[in-house]
Every structure is written in structure tokens, then in C-alpha cells.
Image (cartoon, rainbow, N blue to C red):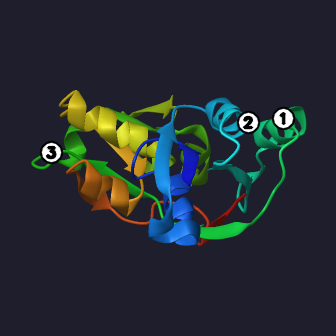
Amino acid sequence: MTVAYQGEPGAFSEEAARAFFGRKARLAPLESFKDVFRFAVQHRSSCGIVPIENSVSGSIHQNYDLLLKHKLHIIVEVKLGVQLHLMVLPGVSLKNVRSVYSHAQALGQCEDFLRSLRRVNVVAYYDTAGAAKMIRERDRWDAAAIASGRAASVYGLRIVRRNVESNRPSIISMN
């Protein structure tokens, strides 16, 4: 079975897929929630996993709308605790960071921490792990990502601040 999820390796949706399906499934990272739903419809022997609710930000309306549009069924709910970390390339100091990238919901969850940073531009990106991947691939010595500890490991980044979310623990419900 193949399980599609939105994001890059190291994304929280990947973590939820691994938590429920374990090693039984092949995981397929896709760029958008729409792509996950299309995949699930086109590959009937497979499924997709998407967040539907965040304990801090509330419902993820786009995924409810996509669920109705595609007439798919929820087969399981996975509750996932989320810890968000600020990460940079090895050798980069926090004082050198001028931009912080992450998914819009993650940025919202880290609002208090982000307000404490001076002269830093906050930039919404399509995925938390995607932000970490971009910093590594583009060799961004002036940027940081907010993502999971696994994303830091996957992309060889150094965590400079742990648990930067405003409300702990944050829980995401995945279906």
C-alpha cells in the first residue's frame, strides 16, 4: 500500500503516516493537500493522510472541503504531538539569521517566539520540512526554518532553539 502525504520527508504528516502504518506502507510525499486527495482518488488501493485539525489553529478547512469534494472516507484518526524547532545550517549563528521559513500554520503556532526575534523576516513556505530542505539545498546562511526534529536530521541542520511553539503541547489530528 502507498500512503500519500503533503510535504517533504520530515513533515509532520509523514510522521503521522509512519506512526499508524509503520513499515507496511510505501510513503509518497506530495506538494499540496489537493495532490494528496487526487492521489487517493486515482489510486484506489492506496490512501492519503492529511491534517484536519490543529489544537492551536483549529480546523483545516481546506481539507474538510477537499474531503467533501472527493467523496473519500476517513478510516482512522491519528493524534500527533507537535514540537517545532528553529534550525539553521551547521556553523550559522542565530544572530546571522535574517529570514525564518515555515508553513503558515507552524508560523502561527510560533508567534510569540517569532515576535521576540529582531530584524528577522518571517516567510510562509509550502511545508515545514520543505523549508528545512530549501535552506540546505540553497545553502542559506542567512535563514532558518521552523520544523520537526526529524526534518533537522534529514536535511543536516542544527537546532538552535527547541520547542518554539507558543502553546505546548500542540496536537494535530490526521485522517
Q: To which residue does mark 2 refer? A: 41
Relative to 72, is 159 on the left or the right?
A: left
Whether pointer 2 and pointer 1 mark residues with C-beta atoms closer than 8 Å, the reply is yes
Q: To which residue does mark 3 refer? A: 92
Q: Secondary structure at mark 1?
A: helix
Q: To which residue does mark 1 refer? A: 70
How far apart are the two marked residues, 3 and 1, measured between alpha carbons? 45 Å
Residue 150 lies, with reference to residue 169, above or below; the image says above
Amino acid type of the residue tagged 2 in the rendering: Val
* Residue that sits furthest to the top in the current view: 138
Amino acid type of the residue tagged 1 in the rendering: His
Q: Position of residue 85 (x, y in %)?
A: 39, 58
- Is there any visible trace of residue 142 in the rendered image? no
* Residue that sits furthest to the left in the current view: 91
How far apart are the two marked residues, 3 and 2, measured between alpha carbons? 43 Å
Residue 46 lies, with reference to residue 126, above or below; the image says below
Residue at the (57%, 61%) spot, across then down = 166
Residue at the (53%, 40%) spot, across then down = 103
Q: Position of residue 30 (x, y in %)?
A: 52, 36
Give the crowd class for mark 3: few <14, some 14-19, many >=20 residues within 10 Å. some
Amino acid type of the residue tagged 3 in the rendering: Val
Quadrant location, the C terminus: bottom right
Who is closer to the viewer here, 58 or 78?
78
Who is closer to the viewer here, 74 or 160?
74
Relative to 132, is 27 on the left or the right?
A: right
